Amino acid sequence: DIPEGFSPRIIELARQIAGDEETAYDKTMAITQYLRHTITYSVSIEKPPNNREPLEWFLFDQRAGFCNYYATAEVMMLRSLGVPARLVVGYAEGTFDPERKEYVILAKDSHAWPEVYFPGLGWIAFEPTVSQPLNGFLSGDKPRAPCRLGQADLTKASAEAICKPDPVTAPSPV
């Protein structure tokens, strides 16, 4: 759901980006790619003006931000299209230490990303933040493997077979 009175400009932008896409997967990929191609990543941005809705300011004026902005924008645009989505906060991959043969995760690796609900699969992570690697979600602009479920890749064809254009009902995003 989206809050009553949610920005009509953002709803219209989401509709424009999704265009004629019918599946939740294709709508998600369209919005993910839009954000990756049109918003600049920055760890430091100005505070949104007091008289502006922060998400509108991010998408239409500032056009730069960090992961919290990217993930929030994707979640809210997807929800406005009827696609179940939630915001997740945790840590990015970190840096591999070859001597220790493990990844080192620091506070600077904190990250936020959207997850989309697919019936029969559950919540699947997507990556709209351009500073983050796609990690097999995409290869360039061509969808390859939109998500990972344990060790099994979900291909676009199987996502489309599962994610029908009909509205879906997701469990509570807790």
Image (spheres, rainbow, N blue to C red):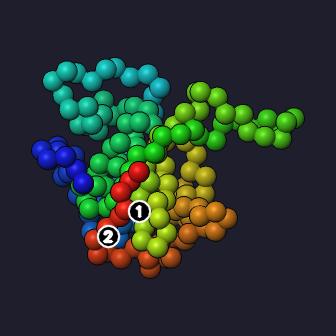
Q: Is residue 145 above or below residue 37?
A: below
**Label 1: few (<14), some or many (≥20) within 10 Å?**
many
- The image quadrant of residue 31 is bottom left
Reading the image, the residue beneath label 1 is 117
Reading the image, the residue beneath label 2 is 168
| Residue 40 seen | no
Three-letter amino acid code of the residue under disc 2: Val
The answer to whether residue 56 is left or right of residue 156 is left
Q: Is residue 106 above or below residue 1?
A: above
Residue 157 position within the rendered picture, expressed as x and y whole percent measured from the top left: 49, 76
**Label 2: few (<14), some or many (≥20) within 10 Å?**
some
Three-letter amino acid code of the residue under disc 1: Tyr
Residue 5 position within the rendered picture, expressed as x and y whole percent measured from the top left: 12, 44
| Residue 113 seen | yes
Q: Is residue 79 above or below residue 165?
A: above
At horizontal 24% and vertical 54% (from top left) the residue drawn is 1
- The image quadrant of residue 109 is top right
Q: Secondary structure at mark 2?
A: loop
Count the labels in the image: 2
| Camera-nearest residue between 110 and 96 | 110
